[in-house]
Amino acid sequence: MLIYGYDNTSGPVLFREELQVSNALIGLVNTLPLIAFGLFSPFVPILSKRMGMEKTLLIAMFILSIGIFIRSLGGISILLFGTLLVGIAIAVGNVLMPGLIKLSFPYRIGLMTGIYSVSMNLFGALASGISVPLADLELLDWRNSMQIWSILSFSAVIILLLRLPAIISSNKKVPGEVKSHPQNNLFKSKIAWAVTIYMGLQFLIPYSLFTWLPDILLEKGFNQEEAGWLIAVFQIGLIPANFIIPIIASKLNNQRVLAFISGLIFFFGLVGIALISSQLINVFLLLAGVGAGTTFSLTMMFFVLRTNTVAESSQLSSMAQSIGYILAACGPIFLGVIAEWFHGWTAPLVILMVVSLLIAFFGTIAGKNETVSLKVRENLR
């Protein structure tokens, strides 16, 4: 249901005709989850401290199931409200999952992060690919096609409920005790800011491409069917990188070279997308997808590797995602305006190339073998 933690089962092709919504409202539906991620993420560690990590996730999955189911029950107002619930629930999972991996699989962090990243993108691609065909079936419509995905989130509710007795009996309260004013300390950490900027910039490129790549390809002369397959090529590049990179990163003493290379992969992929109008563009779309998967997986690993405790992991995840998703939400809008000003997509793609080089730069800082708590103590002296 998610690509990059983003709800993508409510594509405008499903509801545009019946609800007769404008492009502005469609843009709001697509952007609302990102806004919810950014605004709600800072509150997740507070809730987790009070209720415990698993209980917080349980409530989030319940809200997610409700949001997915109800958003197709009425008109545009219900759709927006349900989408907002979905965004809030996903924000909880985005923030807490790195800490949960650190807590539950301390000796398998790379492997489990890879499985988490792959499953998130794989199910996202699956939802994108079959939601429209489901809506076209004789016994179903677009509302049923959107509601059916609540089965998966409700399955997560059942799994967490089965774990609840063990959680209560062991009286676990994770991510654990949080020291006073942890966020203020994180804001003084150079490593925390490097991870945050790295995450925000690496989110900006894929979300911009997901939004505008069809227009870019159409301008190059590809038809709509070809553009659809080319976008799939970009998504295919994500999956192997999502699995392999966390395993490699976990075995390295530091991830500076890997993070630097991730930005360069993005850069060369974008150069090819900008310059090539033949079928050779498949290679560079695949390369850009590898860059997206590499940077995303490294970000998830940084939440674990740059922290000493589960509490710090959740706090760093909260800080980075609250800022990163707001930046990601602004990126497509900004690039759309730039494209209108320059009457084409060359200038926006050049901007994304510059962003990819910044990713390489901040990745060399975020990849240092240091933790935020160590940097906080140094900065407080």
Image: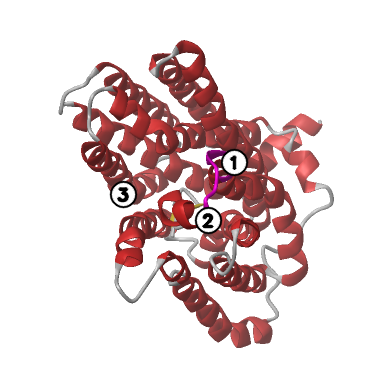
List the residue tagged with mark 1. Answer: 325
Q: Tell me the residue at 54%/55% (across/down).
A: 98
Residues 362 and 284: in front is: 284
Q: Amino acid at mark 3?
A: Ile
Q: Which mark is residue 19?
A: 2
Q: Is residue 177 visible?
A: no
Q: Which residues are magenta?
A: 19-25
Question: Within the image, what quadrant is residue 267 found in?
Answer: top left
Question: Within the image, what quadrant is residue 54 found in?
Answer: bottom right
Q: In the rendered structure, which disc, 3 or 2, sits on the residue that comes first in sequence?
A: 2
List the residue tagged with mark 3. Answer: 239
Q: Is residue 356 visible?
A: yes
Q: Amino acid at mark 1?
A: Tyr
Q: Tell me the residue at 36%/65% (across/down).
A: 135
Q: Element under label 1?
A: helix
Inter-mark Cα distance, 1 to 2: 28 Å
Residues 121 and 83: in front is: 83
Inter-mark Cα distance, 3 to 2: 34 Å
